[in-house]
Amino acid sequence: MLIFHYLNLPVLAKLSTELIACFFVAAGSMLSWKPRHLYLWDISGLFFSIVLLFYVDYYFLIAITISAWAALSMGLGLSFILSMAMAPSTFDNRGRTAAFLALGVSLVLTLSLILHYVALRTLHTYALTLLALKLLALTLLAEAAPLSIEYTRDYTVIRDKRPLATLFASWLAFLIIDYITAYSIEVFYGASLVSFQRIIGMSLGIVFFPMIGYLIDRHGRRPLVLVSYLIIGFEYALISAYEGALMFYSIFESFSWCTLTLFFVFIVWSDVAPPETRTKLYVLGFIPVFLGRFVRSLFEFFGITLERYELYPFASLFMFVIAVLIFFFTPETLPSSIIERRRMINYIKRARKIKERYG
């Protein structure tokens, strides 16, 4: 999705590119890839990013081409790499593993955003960012080792399609609302404010990712997800009542983005499915990104603008409704046996401390 941050495409081009992206992501998930094939995909991306550094003509044609290529690479390669990178993780450390991967990507994106807004070299910035991400993916491929992990076979969530549909719909709804609110801020307060908030949010993510990864492993997935929706809902309600609350928008949104990105992009599909079926499920974390961008572009294409008092009360209510749906229809994907074991360990530790204190 980096292409949409760096290239100022016409609205019609954005709409078509986002639909093409959804198609490529869905089609790519149906292919069967082996790790050795991904080396060719990754090396081709490295070569392509180097070419972009020196190619400056036919800007619009290049924009469309690399947009389609980025969408194709998301479906063909990234879901498999992400599934493979998360495969060695267990229920005990999956949040921290996801946080480590997300932190690496976040560092690259933060530096690229700063470079983009300082140097204003749009195409070159995208090429350098793509080059860095491809090198990161190549490193993951090189470090991948044969798995010798005993997986649990109790994947009850995937046998029931309703939780999967709820997860997909919750992630999609958040992205649609977030992209529309960001578009509203850009229309009424200028692109410079959005750019500044984006840099602040990405920088805060460097701090939030490790903290959230630890909390997700320790206290479970669902409590953090619920808190994220409630926090962003509270922030939208505050903005609807007090315009000055926009100054806190980056903080609350960054926390919610980090939590929901870790959960919906990295963690949940490994929690609910065995390794052999995860690649296709990981695509469910990517498609909503493009659909959310598509809805935002529709607003831009039709010139739809919503005032602060019109948009944010609705957005706030919508986030609270999603939180209720998650509470009632989405199970905790961290197994109860893991939670009970941790409770027992904590109980034993407290008992030992009491015994040492009172003899």
Image (cartoon, grey):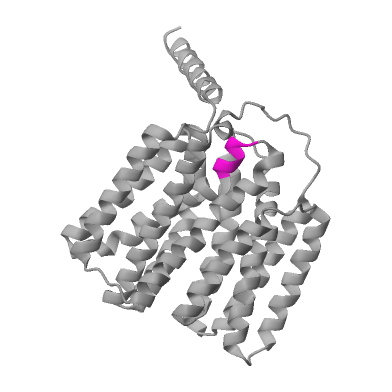
Q: Is residue 11 above or below residue 173?
A: below
The residue at 52%/73% (across/down) is: 16
Image check: 3 left or right of 132?
A: left
Q: Overall secondary structure of the magenta stretch?
A: helix
Residue 102 image offset from top left, x and y in percent: 56, 54
- In terms of depth relative to the viewer, which is nearer, 287 or 132? 287
State the extent of the magenta-drawn residues as a range.
267-273
Q: Residue at x 46, y 32 (%)?
A: 331
Can the viewer see residue 251 in this picture?
Answer: yes
Figure quadrant of the N terminus: bottom right
Side of 244 where 258 appears, left or right: right
Q: Is residue 188 left or right of residue 176?
A: left
Asked if the magenta segment contains residue 269, the reply would be yes
Residue at the far top in the pictured view? 359
Q: Is residue 108 visible?
A: no
Answer whether residue 212 is magenta in the image: no
Q: Residue furthest left?
A: 241
Note whether 63 is above or below 27 in the view shown. below
Q: In which quarter of the view is residue 189 placed?
A: bottom left
Measured as percent of width and height from the top left, residue 342 is found at 52, 23
The residue nearer to you, when weighing 171 against 234, is 171
Residue 315: where, in percent of width, then height? 28, 55
Q: Position of residue 323 (x, y in %)?
A: 35, 41
Give the vertical position of 56 relative to 19 (above or below): below
